[in-house]
Amino acid sequence: MSDITTNVSVVGEAIYPHLNKPDVRFNEYGEYKVTLKVAKQDASAMVKEIDQAFEDNLAKVSSEAKGKKVKAASTKPYKLEGDNVFFKYKMRASGTNKKTNEKFSQRPALFDAKKNPIPASQSIWGGSLMKVAYQLIPYNSPAIGAGVSARLKAAQIIKLVEGKDQNVFKEEDGFETTKPEEKENS
């Protein structure tokens, strides 16, 4: 697999990033992921690159199928909506290597705008501007068909958006809860 090229996206806006800790909601092994929102005019080269990899894999699988009909996957790792393209990047957090049967764990490398490593403790929220390093991985499955996925490798955060205090209210007259230390003294 050493012949797989690592590509770098243009700058886009992160949508629901899971870059610090893996999302385990639908995958017990965990998954690092981010959807990158890119303006349509800036995304054309990336779309062409993915489409070409998709077609190349379909042609390769078809030539190896010995006359059998090969199904094309119904989805690609991007979706066009209005004036934007949404690219989906994923990386499995842990699992077992199918060839060597060894357990593994991995995480995407995170960098700031000046290429300095970002600690895993730094929270990265949706709305952050970033570039993503990724690999286009060909696949073929009888149920899904032949296609490509975009494997997340690293992210460079250009503009960081962090979580903020969720208490957006101002103080009002009215109900006031008893503070824990007041309860203990009563």
Image (tube, grey):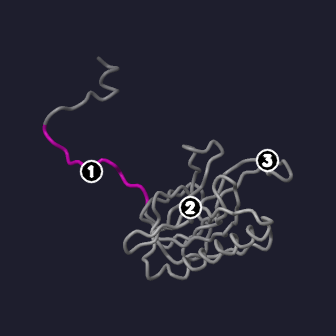
Residue positioned most to the left: 173
Identified at 60% across, 59% down, the residue is: 90
Quadrant in which the N terminus is drawn? bottom right
Q: Which residue is mark 2?
A: 74
Q: Does the stretch in magenta take in 55? A: no
**Which amino acid type is shown beneath numbered disc 2?**
Ser
Rendering coords of residue 8 (x, y %)? 61, 76
Q: Which residue is mark 1?
A: 168
Q: Nearer the viewer, mark 3 or mark 2?
A: 2
**Which amino acid type is shown beneath numbered disc 3?**
Lys
Question: Disc 2 vs disc 1: Cβ atoms closer than 8 Å?
Answer: no
Q: Which residue is mark 3?
A: 103
Give the mark nearest the N terminus, 2 or 1: 2
Q: Is residue 160 above or below residue 174?
A: below
Give the mark nearest the N terminus, 3 or 2: 2
**Which amino acid type is shown beneath numbered disc 1?**
Val
